[in-house]
Amino acid sequence: MVRGNLLEEPVDAIVNAANGHLAHGGGVAGIISRAAGPSLQEESDRLVTARGPFATGSAVATTAGRLPFKGVIHAVGPRYGEGDEEKKLVQALSAAFSLAVERGWQSVSFPAVSAGIFSVPLDICARAYLAAARASRLSKVRLCLRDQPVIDAVLKELKR
């Protein structure tokens, strides 16, 4: 776990906290999309047009646009209240990490998926983040955070 800027991470790919329509307007998704340039949203729109919305718990990779990464992996995390949030969050992150492995990427950094505008409680998120990262076959998985409450929740879970 690191405190930092996801866009400056020393990794092959970053994970985006996405919604099923890959509409990257707000939160982490909006920050990534604006930094990547219009090609990221255009590619995302083409994917959704071709396949339909992506299910909660799934992930899909795109190019990184202007970002210095080999790709961006969009993990569709759960919204609070839809049920089985922890399981779905582990599933989304695991799917993201598996996509990285399939593409030959060795390192990935991911943000606080579902903890922001999707309002999943931080203790649930912390458990899911650690479970998915520990099960990953990647050589380096970094949880890149910036908000102290999320950091505190992960640190508390690490102490268990």
Image (tube, helix red, strand yellow):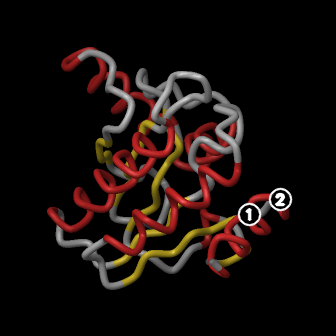
Q: Quadrant of residue 146?
A: bottom right
> What amino acid is at disc 2?
Pro
Q: Give the side of residue 32 with respect to residue 94, left or right.
A: right
Disc 2 is placed on an element classified as helix
In whole angstroms, how far apart are the C-alphas of marks 1 and 2? 6 Å
The residue to which callout 1 is attached is 153
Quadrant (top left, top right, bottom left, bottom right) of the N terminus:
bottom right
Q: Give yes or no for contact between labels 1 and 2 (Cβ–Cβ under 8 Å).
A: yes
Q: Could you say where residue 92 lies in the image, as x and y percent from the top left?
A: 37, 45
Disc 2 packing (10 Å; few <14; some 14–19; many ≥20): few
Q: Could you say where residue 124 lies in the image, as x and y percent from the top left?
A: 60, 50
- Classify 94 as above or below 51: below
Q: Residue at x 48, y 38 (%)?
A: 77
Disc 1 is placed on an element classified as helix
Q: Give the side of residue 118 with respect to residue 77, left or right.
A: right
- Classify 53 as above or below 14: above
Q: Residue at x 49, y 27 (%)?
A: 83
- Classify 85 as above or below 146: above
Farthest right residue? 148
Q: Residue at x 34, y 32 (%)?
A: 43
Q: Quadrant of residue 145?
A: bottom right
Residue 115 versus residue 25: which sits nearer the camera?
115
Q: Which mark is residue 121?
A: none
Q: Residue at x 75, y 67 (%)?
A: 151
> What amino acid is at disc 1?
Ala
Residue 145 versus residue 66: which sits nearer the camera?
145
Q: Quadrant of residue 117?
A: top right
The residue to which callout 2 is attached is 149
